[in-house]
Image (spheres, grey):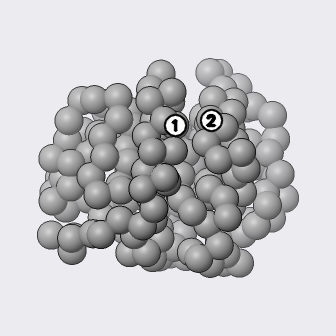
């Protein structure tokens, strides 16, 4: 099995790609549509990434972990897609690690996973996270029962290490979302 990174377009490209592939040796790039997606790197579009599968063609049991890349565009498109939101919720309900960096907690919020959780995010999202009922903290990585969140690309080393650690723990027992 592998880690899965659902992305639409406009995630932080080079850093997210490199770290996703380093976590488990293989990452499947899942998107809303077939073809290629582009990440954003500083002030321009990064290199295209081939989409491995679409969100409507994947099953939770095919993957060991779910990593939702950040940036502003990608999570915004994913949280507006019903299939993506359902998949994120189903993945969380499976007990497998779910990770979100930067603005990606928007997708967790949309899936109803934030209430009662300790989380972090990009600093401009602190109010969004708090308004969703989570306890927001300013730390490079936060884990709450296999739900892993991180602030920004500068935290990706710690974020990646925590994803690996949580994958090694396997399926997590989860309390119901408050």
Whether residues under marks 1 and 2 lie with C-beta atoms below 8 angstroms apart, the answer is yes
Residue 108, image x and y in percent? 37, 59
Along the line of sight, the residue nearer the viewer: 45 or 150: 150
> Disc 1 or 2, which lies upstream in sequence?
2
Q: Secondary structure at mark 1?
A: helix
For marks 1 and 2, give the CA distance.
6 Å
- The residue under label 2 is 19
Query: Would residue 73 be found to the left or right of residue 1 on screen?
Result: left
- The residue under label 1 is 160
Residue 30, image x and y in percent? 68, 61
Q: Look at 49% across and 54% down and name the residue there.
A: 167
Say which quarter of the image contains residue 22: top right
Say which quarter of the image contains residue 51: bottom right
In this rendering, the answer to whether 95 lies above or below 145 is below
Along the line of sight, the residue nearer the viewer: 116 or 84: 116
Residue 57, image x and y in percent? 71, 78
Q: Look at 36% across and 56% down and name the residue there.
A: 146
Query: Would residue 23 be found to the left or right of residue 128 on screen?
Result: right
Q: Quadrant of the N terminus?
A: bottom right
């Amino acid at each position: 099995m592998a880690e899965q990174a659902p992305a639409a377009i406009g995630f932080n490209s080079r850093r997210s790609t490199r770290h996703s592939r380093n976590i488990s040796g293989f990452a499947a790039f899942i998107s809303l549509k077939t073809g290629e997606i582009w990440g954003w790197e500083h002030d321009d579009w990064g290199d295209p990434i081939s989409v491995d599968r679409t969100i409507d063609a994947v099953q939770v049991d095919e993957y060991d972990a779910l990593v939702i890349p950040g940036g502003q565009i990608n999570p915004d498109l994913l949280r507006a897609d019903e299939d993506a939101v359902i998949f994120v919720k189903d993945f969380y309900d499976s007990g497998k690690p779910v990770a979100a960096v930067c603005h990606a907690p928007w997708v967790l919020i949309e899936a109803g996973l934030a209430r009662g959780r300790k989380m972090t995010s990009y600093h401009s999202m602190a109010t969004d996270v708090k308004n969703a009922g989570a306890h927001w903290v300013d730390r490079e990585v936060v884990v709450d029962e296999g739900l892993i969140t991180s602030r920004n690309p500068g935290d990706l080393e710690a974020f990646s290490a925590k994803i690996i650690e949580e994958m090694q723990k396997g399926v997590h027992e989860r309390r119901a979302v408050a």
